[in-house]
Amino acid sequence: MDFHFHAPVKEFLRYLGEYAEPALRYFNAKVEIKDLKVILDEVETLGIERVVILPIDSTTFMGRRIPNELVAGIRDARVIKFISVDPLKPNAVEELEKAIKEVEPQGVKFHPQLQGFHPLDERAMKLYSVVERHNLIAVFHTGTSGIGAGVRSNIRLDYGRPIHFDEIAVMYPDLKMVLAHFGRPWTEEAIAVSLHKPNVYLDLSGWAPKYIPRVLWDNAKRLADKLIFGSDFPLISPKRWLKEFDAIPIDGEIKKKILKDNAERLIK
């Protein structure tokens, strides 16, 4: 299960707008615009049975979004649907409740940097409460941001510091939290939070495995039930990610948990 997937590609690039070219350069990514079914057929040949598609609503901060309606309209059993709501909207709670009812998602994606809110903003915490009450998963972007890298913007990297989410894990102990991109360059912070808080997991997307800091692989045994495979398609190729992961010298049972078991335990 690829737990971090941006598709359809055309809509994802449209969302990035003027940040698209610098981001592709940052990731050294070559992106082809293909039909979603074609993409899913291709990753299925790699052994990827399901993908988590993550929309994003940055209406207030960036004036753009990948709408929940787009995800809701996908009719393919290989797609696990998440939604996103802009926490800065005055009607955010009502919009979130409505989207949960209409889309029936498995979780909600938050990107504090691209949505322009501190993780401990009271407006955002009202949404965490809704997600917890519905027993859904909250995926948070953590770490640096390839979006906006090298470009003048108001994007604040501090909003992705993993230590902020320790407080959220305390306040919402039943909220299933996935810290995307394992908080790099604050990887050790992310590891500490995940080991300390039973409701916090780390997804490994956004970096090819050979660039993932050794400290994470050194702690793979302790984190065996907390690590989740994600590619960050189309910025990172799932094919490349899996090929490099195969060469990482950790126990095969741990690899199985990372690739499938841990994610399936989270999904309802």
Image (spheres, rainbow, N blue to C red):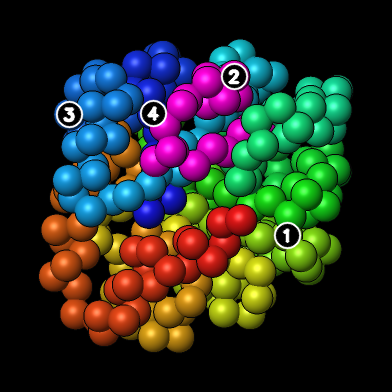
Q: Answer with mark 2 or mark 4, whichever residue precedes in sequence.
A: 4
Q: Is residue 224 above or below residue 138?
A: below
| Few, some or many residues within 10 Å of mark 1 (<14, 14–19, 20+) | many
Q: Which mark is residue 175?
A: 1
Whole-Å distance between the Cαs marked 1 and 3? Answer: 36 Å
The residue to which callout 4 is attached is 7
SS at mark 4 in the image? loop
Magenta span contains residue 162:
no
Element on which disc 3 rests: loop
Give, as a single range, the part of the protein colored magenta: 68-85
Image quadrant in which you'd find residue 171: bottom right
The residue lying at 66 percent from left, 69 percent from top is: 199
Residue type for callout 3 = Lys
Residue at numbered disc 3: 30
Closer to the chain start, of discs 2 and 1, is 2
Residue for point 35% across, 16% down = 10
For marks 1 and 3, the one nearer the N-term is 3
